[in-house]
Amino acid sequence: MFRRPLIVAFGFLLLIVGGYSIYWWVAADQAERAVERWIDDWRKAGYTVDSGDQHLGGFPSLVTLDIDTPRLTDPEGVWHWSGERIRFEVRPWAPTDYRLELFGANQVTAPIDGRPTDFTLRAARAVGGAEVSLAGLLRRISLTFDDLVIDSRTLDLNAGAARLVATLDLPATPPQSADDLSAELMLTGDDMRLPERHAGPLGQEVKWLSTRLIMRGPMPQAGLRQSLQVWRDAGGRLETPWLRIGWGPLGLDAEGGLSLDQDLRPQGLYQARISGFEGAIQRFSDAGMIDPTAARLLAGGARLFAQSGSDGRDFIQMPLKAENGGLFLGPIRIARLAPVVPEPGRPAAAVPPPIAPAPPPGAVESEDLPAILEPPTVSPDFPSGD
């Protein structure tokens, strides 16, 4: 009497389990095909993509695809990335939302001063997500690194961050004109540590960094140098709605935009609000990079033009300009700007030495300054007063 309902219920359960199993395998096949399509797109653009074994799993709640020893090299052979293992996860009922996880150390080779330089990235946790369209086109990818450490034996460099988060958004349709959106990048960093030999008077600790970058203009899928040249010639530009940095005593809040000149050097104009300037000037004076008398005059002059912010801190407003291979804060050149991609065959430059200790009290001569710093120069646009 009761046997028939039990048989019906059991048969219905088998139907559900069997149907879901088939659905899972279909979803797994779609996930594999999506990853293969992304790899094919990279290869068609001239990139070299290799990997070791692939492992499919996660049944029943997830579809997971593990790829061992993935490797990626750009068409010009200048940039290279390799990892120990990368995992893609997707829920069968949400096939457009992927979870990513990187395992082990990641090796990156990038051109620094015209020569390939190796970096090793390690993180306690490296996870992210990716959103794709139903057609498998990438729309968003994000990565979060916790307790990140970056090493380079070539540069004798060790840096890190408690947390680094990067999110890249891509438009639904490729850009056709210089005003069309090409990509948008959000980048935040907390408790970052700069290499000791490159930190300077402001110290190694960058408490926070936050920026939003909007790239406009079409950029072809090709080698990085060629892509940037085409993007520049088409009127491409990089807009920065905000850039916020807290480095030692210095606080910077800026907005503006950049493009590239004929040598692929950044050029553009930012409006900057700078707080903590007195502490920063004192740091440079203590390091022997500014004469104490000049430091007092600079601090006094800055106070004359300072305004009070909503947080109670005084700040000054100054233009931050990139032009002719230099970065100018107001009329003062504070850094040299190299091409974002070096010319092929450019000879390697020597690794800069550590910052020199402060010289004995007295007038600071140009030869006493560290070799990695340039004497300040005045922008050619600054009025001469004649």
Image (cartoon, rainbow, N blue to C red):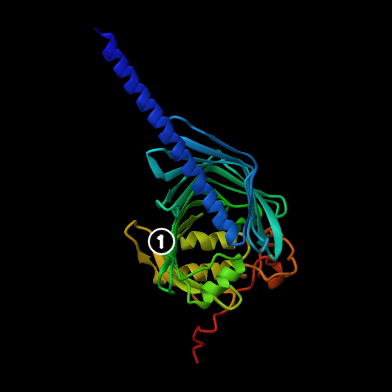
User: Farthest residue toward the left?
Assistant: 1
Q: Give left or right: position of 349 versus 29.
A: right
Residue identified by numbered label 1: 171
Q: What residue type is labelled 1?
A: Pro
Look at the picture and state if 292 lies above or below 80. Answer: below
Q: Which residue is drawn at 53% across and 63% down?
A: 281
Q: Where is residue 210 in the image (x, y as percent from the top left)?
A: 44, 56
Element under disc 1:
loop
Q: Position of residue 332 (x, y in %)?
A: 54, 75
Observer able to see residue 184: yes
Q: Viewer-proximal residue, 176 or 349?
A: 176
Category of crowding for the residue at label 1, using alpha-carbon neighbours closer than 10 angstroms: few (below 14), some (14–19), many (at least 20):
some
Look at the picture and state if 162 lies above or below 271. Answer: above
Q: Give left or right: position of 123 versus 346.
A: left
Q: Viewer-proximal residue, 7 or 60?
A: 7
User: Farthest residue toward the bottom?
Assistant: 386
Q: Position of residue 120 (x, y in %)?
A: 65, 47
